[in-house]
Image (spheres, rainbow, N blue to C red):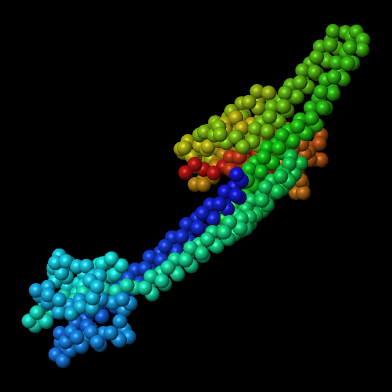
Amino acid sequence: MKIRQKLTLQFSLMAGVIMLLFSLTVYFASATYRRDDFYQRLESRAYSTARLLIEVDEIDADLLNKIEEDNPISLPDEKIIILNYKNEILYSTDTRNVIIYDDDLLTRIRTSGEVRTRSGRYELMGILFPEEYNRFVVLSAARDIYGFDKMKNLRMILLLINGIFLILYYPAGWLFSARAFSPISRVIERVEAISIASLDLRLDEGNGKDELAHLAHTFNLMLDRLETAFEVQKDFISNASHELRTPLTAIRGQLEVLLMKDRPAGDYREATAAVLEDMRKLNRMLDRLLLMAHASSEGAREGFREVRIDEILWQAREELLKHEKEYTVTIALDENISDIENLIINGDEQLLLSAVTNIMENGCKYSPDRSVRVFLSHDEKHISIGFTDNGPGIAENEIERIFESFYRSKSTAWVKGHGIGLSLAKKIIDIHHGEISVYSRPGEGTTITLSFPARL
């Protein structure tokens, strides 16, 4: 059974139960009102009859019978019995003895002053009518013919209304479920339209307040993650295929040249050394591409732990100088740094080391003297690292593009590189909730500043 059908049946059942409870409430409230009203009328008739007989000396039982015969306010099939303190009947209109009572009932009336009960088809009201020298008991009984006819009519009306509405509840529930499911139907249609080629599509979040809006928002967040994952894979494949083609072509060309004819041993050694250098660069580039893919993934933050940023700087310097002997890296710490706790951040040590190494390498690579100066400082909210080189500087219109993958500035095209280092560093800084800024002017060098939130 589909959810819409279940919702329709549940709606019909719930509405039917509510209508039934409402009808029962109306019926029993009406029945209670009828009973109370009829007993009040019985009580009123009992008191009025007793007063005429007991308090008016000119009226005796025979005269009272004649008065009551044509009394317009008499109740249907009314019976009134008046007894003295000896339980002797002083007055009675019950000629056929249809009202059944006993001494126990009379005792209860004298004790409580009022008793409501039934005697066969009659509703009986017993009251105590005290007089100076006597305590009379008055029994007033009658049949509420009109009241029960009204209750029967009300019962039939309520049953008919419940039957009609029970039939109408199903189509009403069907329309209600259709209206309730229309946003879900739109969500389903929109989801069916989303494919690998259209991951940029998003669901309509409506008013942004109800549960369906929350569902759409959650689904859109999932699509954001999926789109990011696909973009990472797409960029990785595109970048790898683009960058791997050149060194692989060079390696293949050198090996093909060597195989054309016999050559001196020195030529083989030179070609082998050139191939190994190309392979070393190729391996380094692949490492950076893998790091870029990892830095772009959702799980990059899972390996975060406490790391000291000053230790990252010294490790990066050592790693860089191990491969590039002619580079010079000078690290200076702010003299106000007195506690190593001020230099701890939460992050991935390997990723931070890669980012810092790339920025150091860029500074040395583009400086004529192959040097870069690093300055570490902190304040109450941030830890800052500045990298300053003596390079040719960067034009203002190119500063925003230097963090794009494989972008190379025209002013530095003469320097070998792949354009991956700064884009990788930017991704790594971003996932650490840090900021990277560049200040540069042509001919005045470049300063790259990293800023990380201090651990509170």
Q: From the top left corner, tell me how far across and down residue 18 is, in percent.
A: 47, 59
Q: Nearer the viewer, residue 379 or 244?
A: 244
> Is residue 149 shown above or below 341?
below
Looking at this view, name the residue that lies furthest to the front: 96
| Quadrant in which residue 63 is drawn | bottom left
Report whether 333 appears left or right of 21: right
Q: Give the residue at x 58% y 60%.
A: 168
Pick the residue in front: 335 or 219.
219
Image position of 173 with respect to 334: above or below: below
Q: Residue furthest left?
A: 133
* Vertical arrangement, residue 199 with respect to residue 153, above or below: above
Residue 389 picture location, percent across and down? 69, 38
User: Which of the 4 quarters of the picture holds residue 367?
Assistant: top right
**Residue 205 visible within the image:** no
Q: Which one is in front, 146 or 218?
A: 146
422 over 2 or under it: above or below: above
Residue 220 visible, this angle: yes
Residue drawn at x 19%, y 82% is: 50
Identify the residue at image location x=44%, y=66%: 155
Image side of residue 208 versus residue 91, left or right: right
Toward the bottom, the furthest residue is 58
In percent of width and height, residue 406 lies at 76, 36
Give the total of numbered labels: 0
The image quadrant where one finds the N terminus is top right
Q: Position of residue 262 (x, y in %)?
A: 90, 8
Residue at 76%, 46% in the rendered image:
398
- Left or right of 232: which side holds 22? left
- Write down the quadrant of residue 68 in the picture: bottom left
What residue occupies the far right of the structure in this picture? Answer: 261
